[in-house]
Amino acid sequence: MLGVDDRLYIAWQTDPVLIGGIWALSVIYTLAVGPLRKRIAPDEPFPVRNAILFYLGNLLFFLTEGSPLHDLAERYSLFAHMLQHNLVTYAVAPLLLAGTPVWLIRAMFVKTPIYPVARFITRPLTAFILFTVGYSMWHLPLIYEAGLQNSVIHHTQHVVFLAAAIILWWPIMSQVPELPRPARLTQLVYMFLQPVFQMLVYAVVTFAFDNLYPTYEMAPTWFTATQAEDQQLAGAFMGLSSFIAFGIPFIVTFARWYHEETGRTFEGHKLNRPEPEYKEAQL
C-alpha cells in the first residue's frame, strides 16, 4: 500500500484529442438519430431506448479514459489497466452496439461499399480471431510498455480495443438481417471458447514469477501490498470478468435454444414456438 513518502499523481484527462473524439462521437450520433433521421430513415421514430444506451456507453467510455483511472492504469497499476480494458470490452462496446438502431447500422455498413468487409469481419470465426489475436498482442510486454510510455498510444490502444470488442459482440447481439447472428448452437460455442482461448493471457499474467511490465515494478502501490500482488489480482480479474461477461449471455442463449428446439421451458411447460425475428446465419 502507499507509504508516507509515496504519492499518486492522478488527475482528470484534458487531452483535446480524447475529449474532442468522444464529443464528436456523441454529436455525430445525435445528428444521425435527430435532424438527419428524416433523410436516412424517414419512417423511423426517434430511438429513445437506443439513444439512452448509446449515451450511457459514451459516458462510460469517457469515465474509463478521462477519469483518474487512466493515470492509475498508465503509471501505477496493472489491475487498474485491466479494469479499463474490461470496461471498454464488456460494458462500453455492448452499450454502443445496443444503442445504434438497425436502420443506422444499415445506412453505415449495409448500403455502402464497405458492406462486403463488414459482412466478413462480423462472421463468428473472423470476429473470434480478430479479437483474440488483438487482445493477446496488446498484452505483449513490448507493445504494452509502449502504451504506458505514450498517452497517444495508450488511447489508441483502447480505441482499437473498442472496435475489436464491437466486432466481438456482433455475433451475439446483432439485430441486422444483412449482418446476422449465427445459429444458436454456433453462438454457444463462440461464447464458450472466448474465455477459454483468452485463458493463456490470464494464466501468464497471474502466475508469472517476475513483473511483466517494468513501468509498474518501481511504482508505488495503491490497492495491494506489492506490485506482484497487483499483477496477480489483475490476471485473476481478467479471467473472472471474462467468464462472467460471456457466461451470462451463454445461459440466456442456451435457454432460448432449448425452448426453440423443444418448445418447452426449463420448468417443462409446453409453449408455442416463436417466430424468429429474421433468419440467422448458417454455419
Image (tube, helix red, strand yellow):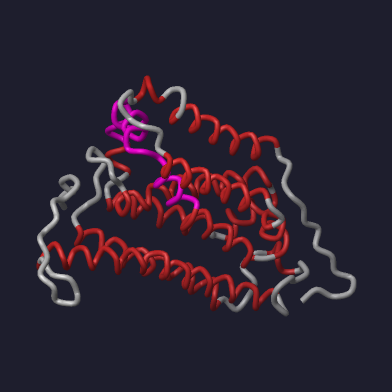
Residue 51 vertical position relative to residue 261 in the rendered view, above or below? above
Residue 15, how many percent across, how many down? 71, 40
Residue at horizontal 61 percent and vertical 61 percent from the top:
81
Residue at horizontal 80 percent and vertical 73 percent from the top:
2
Q: Quadrant of the N terminus?
A: bottom right
Residue 34, how many percent across, how many down? 46, 28
Residue 58, how many percent across, how many down? 54, 45
Q: Is residue 94 magenta?
A: yes
Q: Is residue 13 magenta?
A: no
Q: Is residue 31 left or right of residue 249?
A: right
Residue 204, how many percent across, how many down? 51, 72
Q: Is residue 206 left or right of residue 148?
A: left
Judge by depth and name the residue closer to the eye, 105 or 49: 49
Residue 89 vertical position relative to residue 200 in the rendered view, above or below? above
Residue 169 vertical position relative to residue 117 in the rendered view, above or below? below
Q: How many marks?
A: 0
Examine the image and state in which quarter residue 36 appears: top left
Residue at horizontal 50 percent and vertical 51 percent from the top:
92
- Chain part drawn in magenta: 92-117
Name the residue at the top extreme. Answer: 39
